[in-house]
Amino acid sequence: MVVVMSPGATEADVDRVIGIVRGAGAEAFVSRGVSRTVIGLVGDADRLGMLNLRNQPGVSDVVAISVGYKLVSREHHPERSVIEVGGVPIGPDFLTVIAGPCAVETPEQTLAAARLARAAGAALLRGGAFKPRTSPYAFQGLGEEGLKILADVRAETGMPVVTEVIDPASVDLVASYADMLQIGTRNMQNFALLQAVGAASKPVLLKRGMSSTIEEWLMAAEYIAQRGNLDIVLCERGIRTFERASRNTLDIGAVPIAQRLSHLPVIVDPSHSGGRRDLVRPLSLAAIAAGAEGLLIDVHPDPGAALCDGDQALSAPDIAELADTTARLAALLGRVPTGATDAALLEPKG
Amino acid sequence: MVVVMSPGATEADVDRVIGIVRGAGAEAFVSRGVSRTVIGLVGDADRLGMLNLRNQPGVSDVVAISVGYKLVSREHHPERSVIEVGGVPIGPDFLTVIAGPCAVETPEQTLAAARLARAAGAALLRGGAFKPRTSPYAFQGLGEEGLKILADVRAETGMPVVTEVIDPASVDLVASYADMLQIGTRNMQNFALLQAVGAASKPVLLKRGMSSTIEEWLMAAEYIAQRGNLDIVLCERGIRTFERASRNTLDIGAVPIAQRLSHLPVIVDPSHSGGRRDLVRPLSLAAIAAGAEGLLIDVHPDPGAALCDGDQALSAPDIAELADTTARLAALLGRVPTGATDAALLEPKG
Amino acid sequence: MVVVMSPGATEADVDRVIGIVRGAGAEAFVSRGVSRTVIGLVGDADRLGMLNLRNQPGVSDVVAISVGYKLVSREHHPERSVIEVGGVPIGPDFLTVIAGPCAVETPEQTLAAARLARAAGAALLRGGAFKPRTSPYAFQGLGEEGLKILADVRAETGMPVVTEVIDPASVDLVASYADMLQIGTRNMQNFALLQAVGAASKPVLLKRGMSSTIEEWLMAAEYIAQRGNLDIVLCERGIRTFERASRNTLDIGAVPIAQRLSHLPVIVDPSHSGGRRDLVRPLSLAAIAAGAEGLLIDVHPDPGAALCDGDQALSAPDIAELADTTARLAALLGRVPTGATDAALLEPKG
Amino acid sequence: MVVVMSPGATEADVDRVIGIVRGAGAEAFVSRGVSRTVIGLVGDADRLGMLNLRNQPGVSDVVAISVGYKLVSREHHPERSVIEVGGVPIGPDFLTVIAGPCAVETPEQTLAAARLARAAGAALLRGGAFKPRTSPYAFQGLGEEGLKILADVRAETGMPVVTEVIDPASVDLVASYADMLQIGTRNMQNFALLQAVGAASKPVLLKRGMSSTIEEWLMAAEYIAQRGNLDIVLCERGIRTFERASRNTLDIGAVPIAQRLSHLPVIVDPSHSGGRRDLVRPLSLAAIAAGAEGLLIDVHPDPGAALCDGDQALSAPDIAELADTTARLAALLGRVPTGATDAALLEPKG
């Protein structure tokens, strides 16, 4: 932390600040310039923050330097992490696609979507049983019934399951069915929920808040890590801007920035970023090219009939094309796809 | 809902859309223009939304018209509501100030802050016992111990208590101590929490999400109302923009807009909007002038020692000046202040 | 400027930075902490900025401290300025309303609007002859013919004229007719235009860019001041955010912030901020309450027939109500209105 | 355009709207629903806009449908365009890199940068002679002297020159030296400048405004096209958001969206989007993968000594790596690079 004194600050002002800092057990280093004096502080950032030095006479500004997250930071953990979900790795050197329907509707729709997902090169199945919806009159998900459907489809296809949790009280229930717990964008700063999944024994997929800074996103991950769960994957899903042609604005630069600041894997959700089916392919390729370690994609056997976000779900023909380009791009960049592109899976099992 | 066909749409495309709409039990009205055809739909908006007409051949755009909130809308409830909190009214014709410390720290600090609050013209006491903090390493509040302090200070001062709830599991606990439940900005779309306070028997103070539209804010209020609790007060607290000179940007226009769309009272939090003590007075006056029915203000007996947001808390001399101007402005605008400006309360009771 | 070294920086890294800084003729002061070293720099900020110290080995961050504007800053000119426009003062202690039609259309419309403006308490007449429009197919203004109409209406009503200039080549022409030159929001960083009005002999009304920071706004004012023209009035007119219920978001906090940073007067445009007629009154009152030294308001004798921004223009009945409340609010706050509210002016001269 | 009547609108209200519309020579089609009536309008959008129907009694909303740009739209020109700059094509099937120093400083620096640019696979040289800078105290460019240096370097290297124009009065001068005229982000809505380059005989590179919507960007291109110049290339360069870890936020989705709406080529500036050297490579690859038809990159022989934006300029080793990956990615996507990657050019000519 650096305290910048104003041009008219007196020696007494400077001494007062030094006294407060030293009184709090921290160190203060003074630099006197021609027109201004700057005081460098070293000590516990939280205690220093509580001193409210900005309110002292003669103080012009207080500039924070230390970052607030430690466990998820790369500063003390330079090697980037690989997280395993039901045996499937997510991390550097891999390209892991998670796909499935936005919402679980029926066993048939979920199974069909899982087969599409696998055909798209997905190693993991996503699907929502508890849906956070902006309107209380919109479809809210099937609840535990949806979790059972997901477990059945996992048994049928062998794909581990990623599903959202929206309430601390249901974390144990969801964790008993799922292989990975998803925290949605609206819950990124639902601290009670972050602490609850931090105490769970399943990996967590943490979506970025739709207007959160990268620093706040990493701080939210720190909440989870602090409770003992370091199996966290970050997911960029578009931020809110003034642009109206797409649902959100994919912050593609957030991928390399988060990877530089944190050792956690970073994936991208091209479906919610754009909110338009025609943007899924270009945004997916951009994400992989920028270094994303995975994708989270909406697929639906019949997007026109989807109960949730049908506008952005991919169907079979789009998927084949996407899977092909993705695979070649991963190869070019030296990444190992974790899913098999097996066209035979598009056919129902005898 | 209006479906806009593209210039090249065929008669078959138009007929297909009409067929889908009528098949879903809704009405379709066709307008044929020189270059385009427009189809007006009338029926249940949720069902119409699920039809995903945007995906049909020949469809260029689908424009939503109906609003998604009903219970909190002024459309069917044109008279604006007055909500009572422990006997204190919030609503048109009144000016209600809610003040207190950002966080409850000790009985002494809370009582001293309550007296400052009362001197500032506050009728209601706010104070946080459960604090949602961006960093897991920041002070998280005293929990139930803080609620007890608030109850004691209410007994001492007679001021009803407003305090935040951050977890559905603790709604009953908080409601057993508080007179009004606050939903913080980060929880505006924590739907499990909204439903929990919707089932509680205490009024709710709903802060706007820091990047939420006014429509989403009203939809969040609808979640609460839908569960049976219509005693909701809306609180604008600044939105996130690119500007860095203030912590947030107070969206002063949101006050008259929300009042036009909803019958619920609207108040303003000038402390968090600006994040700077020197902005509290101008933003408070602006809020009242724009029609806000109340203010939510941070006060602290010793802001320099505050454990939370000390940078923005008002102390005694600021308060006297604010209370005076506020009272005269309210009089000019024909509003009845609900608090007494009683300077004697600044002195500790014998 | 402060250079923050990374935790692993070596002594050689620190010495290299010091050498570069001293080699450039500036001073460097070193503060060594437990885990980090901080170097405070004092010298010419532009030269220091060119050193690109962020690129040196061992440097973690470079934090700028000095502000880039000097002539418009309050740091060396603490008393706030009063600017005179055709004899009418704008500045602290006054409340100056500038009103008129968005675009000059005909002599009759402009004269009628000027009378409305005067009835609204306006001391200055605004009206656009050169209109910057988003679409090349929208009405672009009458050009010099419009300037002549404005001059005629000034002769008739005695109201000095404020009008926009959009091209450096026409600054002299516009200045030969107008009493004040307006720079529109889209031209706030049109540096050639800023320099041209900086060389003109008429006061300048500088609108804030729709996504500019307050610092950039003051830097744009500095461009004008640097060319010798210090008669500048700042105008906040709403910023661009994600909110869609209003055309822009009035940044009401920008008023006290700009007044604290700069000695220049600050006024507010409630018409463009909201883009809705029903927001003009609440935003006007909020602006005055927050300390704005004036208002810029669209009025039109027949808003429904306006060629430009008719949605937000006030007509006669709105104006009477606004003028009345504004006058009482100004009195409460101890401000002197510079316009006369003279209902007789609503009648055409015999 | 669609007029949505409010629930309480009367038949007289509906008839009044129809009368106004028909009186203006346009068509009106009425759709009566259970709770609302919708009126579809067909006719000239500008005339319809001037009717201000929103102000009529009983009107709840007016929804615009037609787009405002025609010449640059793909609606009537479905095949995407290829623009030639000094013989170098920019458009679908190609990948064209434009590179060079942010500012022209000396003949030696510019020549060295051009060689770096060519080594990076650039076919076109960019460099600024007229620099729009936020601060009036920052380096403003060499002016005509800089244009002469660019022309000399073109003669030496054979690379056509792209350079910025900031004032309508100097368009002819700049066009006499340059092969392509650049409009910077701050001038995207400087309509006098757009019209001036629209009348010039050189292709135009139009950067997106830093807070402009895609629609406004295309409307700005329409201003140029309307004056007769259809040789326009669009350049996405990052938008302004709340995120502070990068200078701007690259809106990668704008690439496919603009390509879908317009037939003009779209390129990306990864240097200004991120403002950080370490982001240039990931953002470049993302841009190509998303379909961008070119890149605009800052290079400098000695970034640490650059007079402008040195923080983001690439130097030789970065360039070699970028050129290699770019070439392989272009091949994968079936795109023809227009520049030769000729390492020999890194050596000065004997």
Image: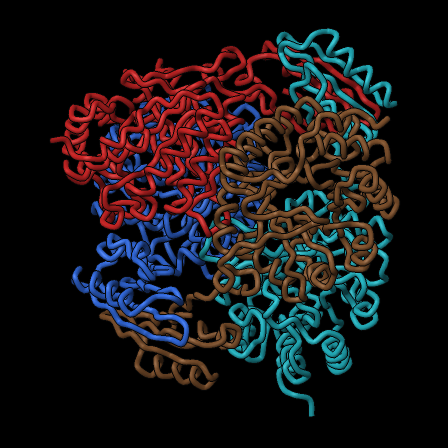
Chain colours: A red, B blue, C cyan, D brown
Q: Is residue B231 visible?
A: no
Above or below residue A271? Residue B15 is below
Q: How many marks?
A: 0
Residue at 73% x, 43% y: name it: D134
Above or below residue D183? Residue C109 is below
As rendered, which of C285 and C275 lies closer to the eye?
C275
Above or below residue C56? Residue B221 is below
Q: Residue D95: where, in percent of width, then height?
A: 59, 40
Q: Residue A274: where, in percent of width, then height?
A: 42, 44
Q: Residue A321: where, in percent of width, then height?
A: 36, 39
Give the quadrant of residue D323.
Answer: top right
Task: Tell me: D159 left or right of A253.
Answer: right
Q: Is residue B117 visible?
A: yes
The single residue placed furthest to the left in the displayed view is A350
Above or below residue B109? Residue B333 is below
Task: Tell me: C43 left or right of B319.
Answer: right
As rendered, which of B141 and D215 lies closer to the eye?
D215
Of the 4 image quadrants, the one containing the C terminus of chain D is top right
Residue at 25% x, 28% y: name it: B169
Of the 4 image quadrants, the one containing the N terminus of chain D is bottom left
As rendered, which of B232 and D52 lies closer to the eye?
D52
The single residue placed furthest to the bottom in the displayed view is C350
Q: Residue D142: where, in percent of width, then height?
A: 85, 43
Give the quadrant of residue D13.
Answer: bottom left
